[in-house]
Image (tube, grey):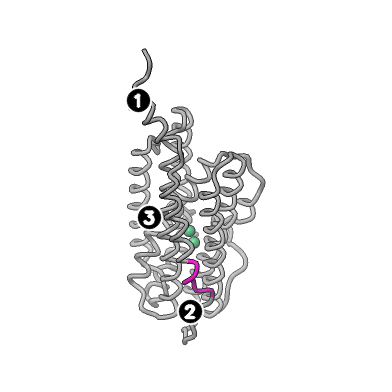
Amino acid sequence: MGRSDEEEAEEVRVSIPQEPAWRALRRAQATRARAARETLPEGKLPTSDAARRFWSRRTWSELAAVPAVSQVVLALVREGAGLEPLGAYAAIAADEVRHAALSRALAERLGGYDEDVPEGLDFAPRSLAAPSDVPVAVWALANGCFSETVSLALIRARHAATRQPVVRAALAETLKDEALHVRVAWHFAGEVLPNLSKTARVDLGGYGAELAEMIRRTFGTLGLPKATERRERALRDDTAAAGLGALPAAQENALVTAALEDVAGRLRRLGVRVR
Ligand SMILES: [Fe+2]
Ligand SMILES: [Fe+2]
């Protein structure tokens, strides 16, 4: 028996990229880029050892996003994706460079940027830049669905709690970009994930669980070696007490946990079960 028109139409809807939605996202990115802030505003900042170290960590995190997003760009080209998603991810890579620059400038003004990542922390921009033949779905899941979504939840809450004008400006700038990154990521996930084979979706779910653990350690302070955890929690608590852009560690961890649950729920609706 031949397939009905509805069945054929459904298949076409699934396989044709959502061009109008991509165009709207690219327009939003262009508008955002025109209003983007490249440097921190003038203004007095206190020196704070906790805050300069906290913002050094934020810099490493933003720096790691640059190769991670670039891997999405490369995988998109390898897999023959259209220009719209390619443009969207290339623009995100440029945003992440700006976030790293703003975070580093803030660390400098708070007392000095730390170049070296201490033992026990998982920030690894250089290893993320190694050549990769990992499929785009995997890179997009790691970067977009997980990192961007958790990052947005944290930055939104830090922005709401921070009054210091220079720090608040850096958070506001990042927040506006991340909100758009999250939209791009989930739009792309919605196009790609439901079309993967069952096996690929099961594999992706397993990988998602590993990613979630890594994110608890890097965005949060859960699951770190004990001494490292104590130090990293104190650093957030002290930065929060000084009003310089972090929330208390317990609050940040609760946000990370809630955001990861949100990610798992959204992925489940796209056919990927994180376990
Ligand atoms: Fe960022
Ligand atoms: Fe981002």
Q: From what the image shows, is residue 210 above or below residue 217?
A: above
User: Label 3 vs label 2: CA separation?
Assistant: 25 Å
The residue nearer to you, when weighing 20 against 150, is 20
Can you say which quadrant of the picture contains the N terminus?
top left
How dense is the environment of label 3, judged by Cα within 10 Å: few (below 14), some, or many (20 and up)?
many
Residue 99 in view of the camera: yes
| Residue 94: mark | none
> The residue tagged with tag 1: helix, strand or loop?
helix
Pick whichever of labels 3 and 1 is earlier in the sequence: 1
Q: Amino acid at mark 2?
A: Ser
Chief SS of the magenta region: loop
How dense is the environment of label 1, judged by Cα within 10 Å: few (below 14), some, or many (20 and up)?
few
Residue 17 at x, y = what percent? 46, 41
Q: Furthest residue to the bottom?
A: 44
Q: Kindly identify which residue carries mark 3.
A: 256
> The residue tagged with tag 3: helix, strand or loop?
helix
Q: Which residues are magenta?
A: 33-38
Image mark count: 3
Q: From what the image shows, is residue 87 above or below residue 159?
A: above
Residue 237 at x, y = what percent? 39, 69
Residue 22 at x, y = what percent? 45, 50
Q: Kindly identify which residue carries mark 1.
A: 5
Q: Nearer the viewer, mark 3 or mark 1?
A: 1
User: Label 2 vs label 1: CA separation?
Assistant: 66 Å
Q: Kindly identify which residue carries mark 2.
A: 48
- Judged left or right of residue 183, residue 36 is right
Q: Nearer the viewer, mark 3 or mark 2?
A: 3
Asked which quadrant contains residue 27, the reply is bottom left
